[in-house]
Image (cartoon, helix red, strand yellow):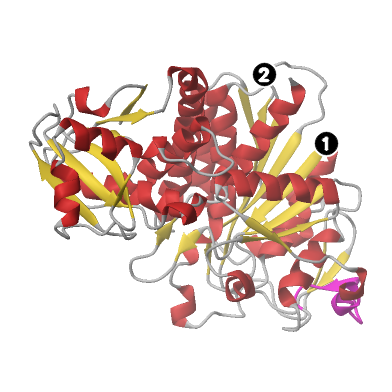
């Protein structure tokens, strides 16, 4: 897909399709008004006749409108003008691209980026438009024997901004948006791969390929023998039930080769989670290929940092393993010793994510990080609490939490902060060890984060529970690419702070 940013009169644009907004009450947007004047009132005449009310979701496709140079004009309902907010804007962008791609038009020009969104400039509107376009056109066909053979597909899209003054910032927004969207697409592709292909070794290969592509990346791998030597007993317990060896991959991006303290991202990478000996019921296993989306997001973020040449030191850690039942699998009532030296009683082998993460978080201390952020499809109760709209956020640093909330609001990949109060810590206590990995169902969303907090006391740390946002489950389920937009925006905010 190719993109262009332009500023100009809509009636003078030669295009296979112009995308224009109509507000509820048959009110013309400024672009629609210009086209209406050029066509001697043709558009307003159609609206008076009742062909389109302008309600959200409605659309009308016009052909060869007199006075214009476009083959088609797509009128899309924007709802009430005063109620057009960020969420509705993104939905309009997504829907408009879906409609245009079905027309057979190979290129189009969208004027939705000229709509007024309170508090957001043209650069923001362009960035959202590019990311929405990637999302609308995404299709996972890697494993299908018969690919989509549609010959006429949308290949070029022009976004219009109100004035020439908007062009420079919008061009930069386009560059950023393409990198973020491609990163999210990488996460989607890895998440959608089946677990017989996307194994820990496969993820290692992807990281190695990334390092070959970008010479500012270095990749190292900690294998199970290294973990044994280091004393990563929690991680090793999870990996013990599978014949596929667990791996921890470290990806280091440091363009300046300076002594800046790194931002460290840690991603849970359980490439398939059967539950281990605490075996999941059959319906609960469907979709467990997505349990590695945290690690896939880490890989994407390092790709984005390299692509945009961000002036930051960024390190990614992918904690990769399979959680399987076997004669060598860890058991409920086992006690394991973590890399930190703290002992953990196993209450449930299906609470495995926190076990690989706790050792990876302790390992991150050796990099003397400025900040550590982990992301994990950690708890089903996060889905029950927040659904698919927000990731759960926990942090031991209020400034960091605020930065992530701000990044979520800008990107649309939002988070909701939950408590890490000391009162919850006693629920983790064990009679035979320092703590239990699954102490019970009461406040289990919070206690899972409290468990990780015991391993991050030396760190400026945040935890993102992405169980509800990383993928849409079910027969038509697919990975979403989240929280890549959120954390990419967090990195961009840090870059702005360095200027």
Viewport quadrant of the C terminus: top right
- Looking at the image, is 424 positioned above or below residue 127? below
Residue carrying label 1 = 370
From the viewer's perspective, tell me whether residue 78 is left or right of residue 266: left
- Looking at the image, is 289 positioned above or below residue 74? below
Residue carrying label 2 = 255
Tell me what residue is drawn at x 34 percent, y 42 percent: 29
From the viewer's perspective, tell me whether residue 162 is left or right of residue 366: left
The image quadrant of residue 298 is: top right
Most foreground residue, 344 or 254: 254
- Residue stretch in magenta: 425-438
Q: Can you give x and y, in whole percent of width and height, for residue 400 in the image?
A: 79, 46
Note whether residue 145 is visible.
Answer: no
Tell me what residue is drawn at x 75 percent, y 69 percent: 448
Viewport quadrant of the N terminus: top left
Most foreground residue, 255 or 415: 415
Q: Secondary structure at mark 1?
A: loop
Residue 90 painted magenta: no
How dense is the environment of label 1, judged by Cα within 10 Å: few (below 14), some, or many (20 and up)?
some
The image quadrant of residue 339 is: bottom right
């Amino acid at each position: 897909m190719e993109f262009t940013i332009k500023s100009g009169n809509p009636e003078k644009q030669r295009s296979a399709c112009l995308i224009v907004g109509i507000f509820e009450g048959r009110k013309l947007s400024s672009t629609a008004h210009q086209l209406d004047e050029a066509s001697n009132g043709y558009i307003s005449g159609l609206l008076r006749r009742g062909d389109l009310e302008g309600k959200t979701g409605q659309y009308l496709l016009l052909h060869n409108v007199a006075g214009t140079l476009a083959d088609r004009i797509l009128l899309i309902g924007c709802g009430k003008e005063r109620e057009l907010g960020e969420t509705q804007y993104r939905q309009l962008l997504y829907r408009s691209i879906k409609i245009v791609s079905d027309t057979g038009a190979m290129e189009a020009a969208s004027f939705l980026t000229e709509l007024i969104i309170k508090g957001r400039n043209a650069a923001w509107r362009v960035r959202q438009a590019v990311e929405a376009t990637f999302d609308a056109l995404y299709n996972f066909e890697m494993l299908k024997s018969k690919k989509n053979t549609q010959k006429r597909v949308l290949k070029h899209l022009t976004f219009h901004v109100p004035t020439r003054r908007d062009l420079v910032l919008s061009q930069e927004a386009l560059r950023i948006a393409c990198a973020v969207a491609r990163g999210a697409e990488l996460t989607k592709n890895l998440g959608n791969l089946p677990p017989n292909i996307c194994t820990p070794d496969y993820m290692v290969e992807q990281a190695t390929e990334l390092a070959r592509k970008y010479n500012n990346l270095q990749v190292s791998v900690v294998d199970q023998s290294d973990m044994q030597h280091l004393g990563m007993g929690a991680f090793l317990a999870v990996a013990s039930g599978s014949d596929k060896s667990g791996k921890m991959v470290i990806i280091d991006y440091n363009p300046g080769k300076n002594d800046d303290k790194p931002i460290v991202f840690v991603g849970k990478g359980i490439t398939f989670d059967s539950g281990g000996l605490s075996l999941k019921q059959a319906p609960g296993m469907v979709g467990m290929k997505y349990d590695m989306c945290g690690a896939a997001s880490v890989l994407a973020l390092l790709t984005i940092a390299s692509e945009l040449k961000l002036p930051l030191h960024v390190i990614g850690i992918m904690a990769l393993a399979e959680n399987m039942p076997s004669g060598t699998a860890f058991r409920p009532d086992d006690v394991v010793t973590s890399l930190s030296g703290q002992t953990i009683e196993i209450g449930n082998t299906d609470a495995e994510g926190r076990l690989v993460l706790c050792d990876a978080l302790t390992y991150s201390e050796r990099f003397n990080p400025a900040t550590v952020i982990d992301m994990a499809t950690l708890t089903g109760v996060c889905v029950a609490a927040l659904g698919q709209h927000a990731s759960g956020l926990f942090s031991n640093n209020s400034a960091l939490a605020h930065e992530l909330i701000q990044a979520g609001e800008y990107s649309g990949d939002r988070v909701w902060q939950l408590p890490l109060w000391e009162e919850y810590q006693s629920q983790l206590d064990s009679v035979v060890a320092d703590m239990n990995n699954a102490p019970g169902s009461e406040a289990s969303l919070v206690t899972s984060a409290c468990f990780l907090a015991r391993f991050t006391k030396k760190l400026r740390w945040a935890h993102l529970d992405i169980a509800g946002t990383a993928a849409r489950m079910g027969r038509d389920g697919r990975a979403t690419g989240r929280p890549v937009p959120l954390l990419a925006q967090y990195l961009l905010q840090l870059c702005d702070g360095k200027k």
